[in-house]
Image: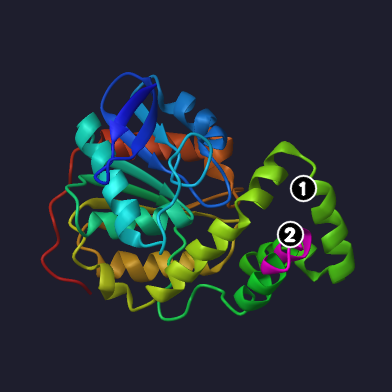
Amino acid sequence: MEQVRARDGATIVLHSTGTGPGIVVVHGGGTTIDVYRRLARALADRFTVHLYNRRGRADAPPRSMPYTVDQEVDDLAAVLEHTGAGNVIGHSSGGFLALEAALRLPIDRLALYDAAISIDGSFPSAWLPSARTAAQAGDTARALAITTAGINPHMAAGRLPFGVRTAIIRAFLRTPIGRTMGELLPSTLDETALILAHDGPATRWAGVTAEVLLACGADGPPHYVDQNAALARALPRARTLTVARSGHDAINRAHPRITDPLADFFAAPVTPERTSHS
């Protein structure tokens, strides 16, 4: 482990493994870097993979309030400067933050998996007020049941009676990962609100000059496919990848059907920037 000084003086703890060109992973909401260690190990024979906990969890410093994109981008900037890495992987809300960072930071290659962005209202949001109300009332199980169904409308479990879903979540909250998700739920809801506050057309991110891989799982929320297609048309150097037999957590499971394309993307020569969009 190494310590990186953030721009506001806080300490970011860096967990690095492997050898080769550096890749920084910006993890998703509701979790810590622990569920990304399998991904790091899968890439470690070709790359040095740098993991760090975003603020408000595990060994990270607390979040400053109000919560803003700027703090997240500043922390990523500090990690990139410390490591000298030009490659970034962003997952879920970490994908949103990494894409925002790519508008400002010298990122060469950016791989996004199920990036939780909102293009012209594409990200499901109707569930957020009721989830916030339940969380503020201290009913974590209810809030998490609302949240999981809201962001995963394609899943059959979301169509179960609400009482059944809540009972399932109560049992889930007794597992290690469930406890983590429950404890981080207020942060997850804040991140969702931030994503929605940055809703706009895909051209909002047209200034990203990095080469971008826009990946999503074929078994995940369907809006990611259309979102990635819209981004690919707007970004100067982007392509899409839909990974078969993969859901939202496939990047954590680190099956070769996702890690091999990631490794190929980061190892390939940089392609020239397109001069226009169709």
User: Within 10 angstroms of label 1, few (less than 14), some, or many (20 or more) residues?
Assistant: some
Vertical order, 84 against 223 (above or below): above
Question: Which residue carries the number 2 mark?
Answer: 140
User: Within 10 angstroms of label 2, few (less than 14), some, or many (20 or more) residues?
Assistant: many
Q: Secondary structure at mark 2?
A: helix
Mark 2 vs mark 1, foreground winner is 2
The type of residue carrying mark 1 is Leu
- Residue 145 visible in the current orientation: yes
The residue drawn where x is 55% and y is 39% is 252
Q: Quadrant of residue 204?
A: bottom left
Question: Which residue carries the number 1 mark?
Answer: 173
Rendering coords of residue 154 (x, y %): 67, 67
Q: Secondary structure at mark 1?
A: loop
Disc 2/disc 1 C-alpha distance (Å): 9 Å
Front residue of 146 and 210:
146
Q: Quadrant of residue 273?
A: bottom left
**Quarter of the image where the N terminus is located:** top left
The segment highlighted magenta reads 136-143
Rendering coords of residue 251 (x, y %): 52, 42
Would you say 135 lies left or right of 213 here? right
The residue drawn where x is 27% and y is 55% is 101
